[in-house]
Amino acid sequence: MGYTNCGKTTLIKALTGDAALQPRDQLFATLDVTVHAGTLPSHMTVLYVDTIGFLSQLPHQLIDSFSATLEDVIHSDLIVHVRDISHPETVNQKENVLNVLRNLQIPDRLMSSIVEVHNKIDLVDSYEPCEPNSLPISALREQGLEELKIVVEEAIVRSTGKQVLTLPVDLSSSQLSWLYKEATVQEVDVNPDEGSAVVKVIISAAAYGRYRKTFQLS
Ligand SMILES: Nc1nc2c(ncn2[C@@H]2O[C@H](COP(=O)(O)OP(=O)(O)OP(=O)(O)O)[C@@H](O)[C@H]2O)c(=O)[nH]1
Ligand SMILES: [Mg+2]
């Protein structure tokens, strides 16, 4: 989420490589909410939602329709707030975005986990991080994106209640293929002599419960 022209579409394009995305130097370049798949450092797939930009002094009649485009935010695992840090009004813009989110009655868990991205640092002479918990990037020059992905992944693991586990796996069983299907396999360390492997996975509590039940593990 963020103001129109702050670089949301450019950022999602850089994170996903989705050539269909068309960033443009104009107000309201994005008029439809679209969804784009990307991969996080642990191989987890994430869906980025490219939203419609905010505008100051939105005509009163349009506030409801604009808010309607943001209703699905409630169902997301994480909000990434993109700010054009080179914009003279960037501080007011941040306040407006947070106010709109408060009015939408976004759940506390989403409000308290917002990842704030300071975009367009390439346009700011000697950028100094001015706020804690914000990530400096240039979506256009693809700077800071790896750091951002790591932060997004940590936040999503936390907000979805997933855990990172290292599990011993019997390769003569279907345990490994089960994990590939139901969880995110990060690393597989095979021990050929023992026909076993040590597998690092990101898995939800529910899937881990089913895994133990399926393979009768204590
Ligand atoms: N210099 C610089 N320009 C950027 C950066 N990120 C985006 N831009 C430019 O900013 C303009 C707007 O980018 P978009 O990605 O379309 O912005 P948006 O937030 O999707 O805008 P709306 O769809 O209107 O809400 C484009 O001309 C981009 O090339 C950046 O990191 N640095
Ligand atoms: Mg856009």
Image: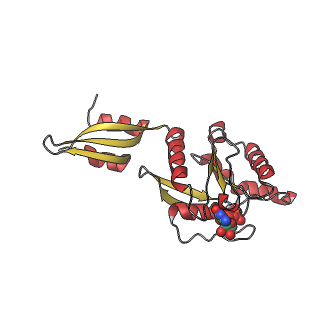
* Residue 31 appears in the picture as rendered: no
Residue occupying the point 66% across, 57% down: 121
Residue occupying the point 54% across, 40% down: 159
Where is residue 136 drawn, in percent x and y? 62, 52
Q: Residue furthest front?
A: 126
Q: Quadrant of residue 32?
A: bottom right
Residue 112 vertical position relative to residue 15 in the rendered view, above or below: above
Locate residue 125 relative to residue 137 in the image: left or right. right
Q: Nearer the viewer, residue 140 or 35?
A: 140
Quarter of the figure with the C terminus = top left
Residue 218 vertical position relative to residue 51 in the rendered view, above or below: above
Structure colour scheme: secondary structure
Locate residue 120 relative to residue 65 in the image: left or right. left
Q: Nearer the viewer, residue 90 or 44?
A: 90
Locate residue 101 relative to residue 170 in the image: left or right. right
Q: Residue furthest left?
A: 193
* Residue 182 appears in the picture as rendered: yes
Q: Quadrant of residue 106?
A: top right
Residue occupying the point 71% across, 45% down: 130
Q: Nearer the viewer, residue 131 or 207?
A: 131
Where is residue 119 drawn, in percent x and y? 66, 57
Residue occupying the point 33% across, 37% down: 166
Where is residue 57 drawn, in percent x and y? 86, 57
Residue 107 vertical position relative to residue 97 in the rendered view, above or below: above
Locate residue 61 relative to residue 86 in the image: left or right. right
